[in-house]
Image: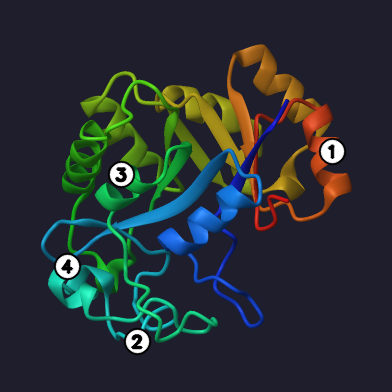
Amino acid sequence: MSIVCGHRGLGPTRAGGSFPENTLESIRAAMQAGATMVEFDVQLSADDVPVLMHDDTLDRTTTGRGCVSGATLAQLRELDAGVGTPLAGQGVRVATLVELLRAVPIALNVEIKVADAACRRHDAERVADVVLAALADDPLRGSRHVLISSFDLELLRVVRGRDAVVPLGWLTERDDLRASWVALALDAGCQAIHPHHAFITAPLADECRAAGVALNTWTVNQRARAERLASWGVAVIITDDPA
């Protein structure tokens, strides 16, 4: 049976949405809607604190401006992270990975974002070290499933070099590499691949099963499509609508 995973909680911040993405408020709402796993994005602040944020910059989802990596945690705490939703002005704040680990009891898909050149202030080694250190202090460590995922295959290699057992998933839309997805993931030490659901076919599911690689996917918001993917053995279905 496939795991239902909330995407950034209850999906991206958007017009008409009730919750702002990558906040504790949205993630708790996803749990209430039936998610048994949540996916969220992590980047580092200027003072090396892993915080929940999808974009390289603060502009879209907070009252701040500029690179996430250019702001300290204290500066991030001053921002309203509820913009664009009914929670604007209601005290929603940028959450840290440590806060989420303490607040959320279910399985986690920790997607590490790597900033583009203009905002990149941390190398892969530092990102891996900081995120793994936070996960090492998970109060539920050993009793819940935690998966680290990223589009950056080289970052995943670095994580694997520092931790031999943490489950890793490679996010990919690289159609030019589709024939090598499974081989590349295995070579990097990943246990799973995470293509967009449009790329998933029954033969790909069969290939993953034969290789012992889990097949997870995003972002599936139609019930019929979710049921088809589940019938092929897709392990984790990431969705904006867990219900």
Q: Which residue is mark 1?
A: 227
The residue tagged with tag 3: helix, strand or loop?
helix
Task: Identify the residue shown where x is 56% and y is 57%.
Answer: 29
Cα distance in 3D space between marks 3 and 1: 32 Å
Task: Identify the residue shown where x is 26% and y is 24%.
Answer: 163
The residue tagged with tag 2: helix, strand or loop?
loop
Residue 168: percent from left, percent from top: 43, 31
Which is nearer the N-term, disc 3 or disc 4?
4
Kindly identify the amino acid type of the residue bearing the numbered disc 4.
Leu
The single residue placed furthest to the left in the displayed view is 47
Task: Identify the residue shown where x is 58% and y is 27%.
Answer: 182
The residue tagged with tag 4: helix, strand or loop?
helix
Which is nearer the N-term, disc 2 or disc 3?
2
Which is nearer the N-term, disc 2 or disc 1?
2
Kindly identify the amino acid type of the residue bearing the numbered disc 1.
Glu
Label pair 2/3, CB-CB below 8 angstroms:
no
